Image: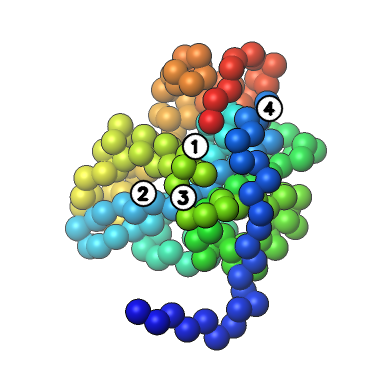
Amino acid sequence: MLLLIQNINFINIKTNIVKDSVPIRPEQLWVSDITYIKTENGHNYLAIVTDAYSKQIMGFKLSNHMKTSLCVEALKMAISHRKYPDKKLIHHSGRGFQYCNTRYTQFAESNGMVMNMTEQYDPCENAVAERINRTLKYEYGLKRTIKDTSLANKMVNQAVYIYNNLRAHLSLELRKPGEVHLNPDLEYKSST
């Protein structure tokens, strides 16, 4: 298969400056990814932005397309939920075209974020985001084929609410992401 890129200017790949690092506070490092959600009408795509320290899902967007605008909308939601906007924030993602797109990187940078990307196309370099995808799919029923996009949206909203506010996380010493995010002085051993 031959892929012809007519305008290389839209690609803006960044270096992985957080490899093997562990965040020490909320909103120090956000991780982003896209996952598939099956419906009877075809695939939908869920873009998620998660705080790597608190594991709180900060923003998300479900759509029937994988365009850059999907990820921009998830990032807009995440920005609107920031609690510590004065702190330096690194945005980490894979190298999908949506995240390498100049529109996305410029939007993130214009909102004070330092962009960061995996070095290779290795899901282990974005493990927190991949783990969130798996949790939402296997623990909240998003892995199965859902009737339609409307129901999928309701299920995603409910899953994110439960995940952030009701589900205790072993990696957070049995605290909830929302609790850890709002109380940065709570001590626990962060793991990515």
Q: In this view of the protein, which residue sits in the foreground, 148 or 144?
A: 144
Q: Secondary structure at mark 2?
A: helix
Q: Secondary structure at mark 1?
A: helix
Determine whether label 2 and label 3 are within 8 Å by CB: no
Looking at the image, tell me whether mark 2 or mark 1 is earlier in sequence order. 1
Q: In the shown orientation, is residue 102 left or right of residue 36?
A: right
> What residue is rendered at 57% in x and 53% in y?
119
Determine whether label 2 and label 4 are within 8 Å by CB: no
Asked if residue 105 can be seen in this view, the reply is yes
Q: CA distance from mark 4 to mark 1?
A: 15 Å
Q: In this view of the protein, which residue sits in the foreground, 44 or 125?
A: 125
Counting other residues with Cα less than 10 Å from the Cα at mark 2, is it few (<14), some (14-19), or many (20 or more)? some
Q: Amino acid at mark 2?
A: Asn
Residue 42, image x, y percentages: 25, 62
The residue singled out by tag 3 in the image is: 122
The residue singled out by tag 1 in the image is: 128
Looking at the image, tell me whether mark 2 or mark 3 is earlier in sequence order. 3
Up/down of 192 relative to 97, above or below: above
Counting other residues with Cα less than 10 Å from the Cα at mark 1, is it few (<14), some (14-19), or many (20 or more)? many
Say which of marks 2 and 3 sits in front.
Answer: 3
Q: CA distance from mark 3 to mark 4?
A: 25 Å
The residue singled out by tag 4 in the image is: 25
Q: Amino acid at mark 4?
A: Arg
The residue singled out by tag 2 in the image is: 153
Give the quarter of the image for residue 158: top left
Looking at the image, tell me whether mark 1 or mark 3 is earlier in sequence order. 3
Asked if residue 75 can be seen in this view, the reply is no
Q: In the shown orientation, is residue 145 left or right of residue 178?
A: left
Determine whether label 2 and label 1 are within 8 Å by CB: no
Quadrant in which the N terminus is drawn: bottom left
Q: CA distance from mark 2 to mark 1?
A: 22 Å
Q: CA distance from mark 2 to mark 3?
A: 28 Å
